[in-house]
Amino acid sequence: MHTKIGLFGGTFDPPHNAHLMIAQEALTVLQLDEVWFIPVYSPPHKTREHMATPAERLEMTEKAIEGNNQFQVSTIELERKGPSYTLETVEALKTAHPETSFYFIIGGDMAEQLHSWKDIEKLKNLVTFAVIDRPGYSIQPIDLKEMKYIKMPQVDISSTVVRERHQLGKNIRYYIPDSVWEFIKEKNIYG
């Protein structure tokens, strides 16, 4: 059976409600069978102090998607360790699932940086990029012929905003799923 899978990679530090909205919108608009969340082990474009561990980010992502049987978590990049390059991940997934069509879900912010991705032309032959509207980013310069564009309500939530609000003692309820919030408190992840 031919399946259509959305791949949604990220640090998920922590996963928040906008991630879930993006995944659901991609699932609906592209008529996907599932969306696979892929927490990166070590993101090539983002490094900072006080990142949650890969195991903590995996557990938070699993908690975030509970209750939606069309959302799955893939540990492919966590198992590989080291920097996470999308091409390597997609090649491994295509080998394991040759009959599957993969759609790589990215925000408008990442779409503007695609030219800097490792072997981007090769990657474009393996997946269809699904570009999600994001506040403050224009997708005009991008060649939309090879991409799917998903317009969705603008929710300006980022993991950075969630961490900063938490560290300042501000409310983050409704920014992240309750199960993720409980886990952050229990493990004292962001201090």
Image (cartoon, rainbow, N blue to C red):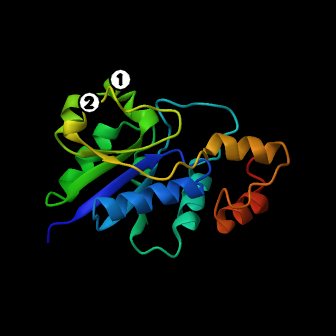
Q: Secondary structure at mark 1?
A: helix
- Residue at 42% in and 67% down: 71
Residue at screen point 51% across, 54% down: 19
Q: Residues within 10 Å of mark 1 (few under 14, many from 20)?
A: few
In the rendered view, does 17 fall on the left or right side of 104? right
Q: Amino acid at mark 1?
A: Ser
- In the drawing, what numbered circle is on residue 7? none
Q: Is residue 3 above or below residue 45?
A: below
Name the residue furthest right.
Answer: 169
Q: CA distance from mark 2 to mark 1?
A: 8 Å
Q: Where residue 163 sits in the image (x, y, percent)? A: 71, 44
Quick one: SS at disc 2?
helix
Instruction: Residue 167: give x, y in percent of width and height.
Output: 80, 43
User: Is residue 58 found left or right of 101 in the rendered image?
Assistant: right
Q: Position of residue 75 (x, y in %)?
A: 43, 56
Residue 83 visible to the viewer = no
- Left or right of residue 85, residue 100 in this image: left
Q: Which mark is residue 120?
A: 2
The three-letter amino acid code for the residue at tag 2 is Ile
Q: What residue is drawn where x is 57% and y is 49%?
A: 155
User: Foreground residue, 44 or 112?
Assistant: 112
Within 10 angstroms of label 2, few (less than 14), some, or many (20 or more) residues?
Answer: some
Query: Looking at the figure, which quarter contains the N terminus?
Result: bottom left
- When asked about the image quadrant of residue 179, the answer is bottom right
> In the image, which disc is placed on residue 116?
1
Give residue 114's position: percent from left, percent from top.
34, 29
In which quarter of the view is residue 164 placed?
A: top right
Question: Which residue is drawn at the image coordinates 47% and 32% (left, top)?
Answer: 137
Q: On screen, 56 above or below 42?
A: below
Q: Are marks 2 and 1 in contact (CB under 8 Å)?
A: yes
